[in-house]
Amino acid sequence: MRIVLGVGGGIAAYKVASLLRLFTEAGHDVTVIPTEAATRFVGVATWEALSGHPVSNSVFDAVHTVNHVRLGHEAELIVVAPATADLLARAATGQADDLLTNTLLMAGDCPVLMAPAMHTEMWQHPATEANVETLRSRGVTVLEPASGRLTGADSGPGRLPEPEAIFSAAMALAGASVATAGAPAAPSAAPAGAPAAPSAAPAAVRALTGLTVTISAGGTREPLDPVRFLGNRSSGKQGVALAAAALEAGARVRLLAAHMEVPAPAGVEVVQVETALELRKAALHAAADSDVVIMAAAVADFRPADVSGTKIKKRDDVADPVINLVRNPDILRELVEVRDAASRDQLIVGFAAETGDAGGDVLEYARDKLHRKACDLLVVNQVGQDLVFGEDTNSVVILSRDGSEPQEASGSKSDVAAAVIDRISAELSRAVPPA
Ligand code: CTP
């Protein structure tokens, strides 16, 4: 595959030399385009030696070959790492002041992946957030940065994801665009042009290469007034563990993040949502190009019928307020209906948090829920005051619509996530008709 590797002017540019090695060792033909600032961190000679191609950052070099037009047209994948705040801003506003930004504008339908790296304040600045949102809305895959030690004494979100994570995300993106361009990809096989990513993980768990997995996580918040909301105890830990496991299995992962107490894993695409209605919109949109949708979010079943535009005050001259609730749409059910109406090849997984009561035990309620929601798999856990919410461990039973034996999984939330992703991989490979 012909890859353009854009390198931004950040200290993390040195890590991109390893990323370049991963691409070339996997047999890809890589042209590196560093920005002027990037060459202050890593020199042109390094990029030329590692890529085996001449390197330039100016549209005025090799003018006779009209470099930016050729590179933009020929690229099958563009990866930008580190994507600095400046580079994100220039790309978002469509500037064309060097070879890299010119090439990005010439890229057409070519998948573009950007791996940001910068200080936390810059990453969380509204200007950067707006630029990232603009790029994502145009179809650019902007990865979440990793959290940890930054260049100075500071630490937080802003580290460049590890080269292996960027490599996997890039291969998944290229594979996904191959898959969506034609027939659905066979999940167990790497798509054409996408070699297996180097990973410590055994080949069997990279079964989602080339597939897009959308996962909702955390708890929705339903506003009552500008300062209050109705929420729930979900921490988002299980959804985040699922996202990490799907990423590890080679998938392109989109995380629909409601309120979470933990950060999203580096390498996933994050869509932030607040309410059930926002989650519904994001889920229906994301499902349109997803091979797997996992609804791990705790979605509020009800929302306040009226949201006060001003803070609700207690007053002695009127009665205390009564909160009227209206029902939120059942997103999982709707996803199944939309999929079935479109006869789409898609695996939909629900989660069920049950307490059991005098009317039935946890599994009885869960079987009934599976029947009502009609999803393919339902991951059931028992919840209560001290069970599951916010904890690092979990114990679940996976029920299948085809009525096969319930499967138990327990351990850390990562163990449970790995078991769920394994089960999803197994379901997908069973769904692929024999050649
Ligand atoms: N869910 C959803 N939309 C809702 C409520 C829940 O998509 N409005 C999804 C959750 O993400 C989860 C599954 O449905 O995957 C089950 O959630 P749960 O809260 O256990 O089920 P409820 O629909 O609330 O059913 P009940 O009220 O009977 O417990």
Image (spheres, helix red, strand yellow):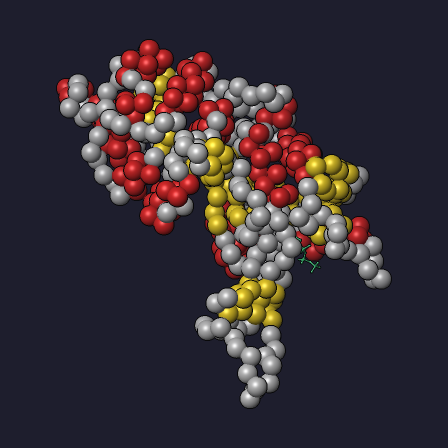
Residue 50 lies left or right of residue 399; in this view the side is left
Front-lying residue, 99 or 371 = 99
Farthest right residue in view: 358
Identify the residue at image location x=20%, y=34%. 97
In the image, residue 103 sits, relative to residue 372, either above or below, namely above
Determine the image quadrant of residue 143: top left
Residue drawn at the location 57% of the way across and 29% of the way down: 248
252 displayed left or right of 49:
right
Report how many numbered discs are placed on residues in the image.
0
The quadrant in which residue 434 appears is top right
**Vertical order, 305 against 230 (above or below):** below
Apparent side of residue 8 relative to residue 397 in the rendered image (left or right) = left
The quarter of the displayed image where residue 319 is located: bottom right
Name the quadrant of the C terminus. top right
Q: Quadrant of ligand 1?
A: bottom right
Look at the image and tell me whether residue 101 can be seen.
yes
Q: Position of residue 272 (x, y in %)?
A: 48, 50
Between residues 300 and 423, which one lies in front from this camera angle? 300
Q: Is residue 351 above or below residue 102?
A: below
Q: Quadrant of the N terminus?
A: top left
Report if residue 187 is visible in the image.
Answer: no
- Please tell me which residue lies in front, 115 or 364: 115
What is the x, y in percent for residue 310? 46, 73
Q: Residue at x 52, y 47 (%)?
A: 256
Return the x and y of residue 30 as percentages of the image width and height: 35, 19
Give percent across and percent down for residue 240: 59, 41
Q: Residue at x 52, y 75 (%)?
A: 312
Direction bottom: furthest residue: 317
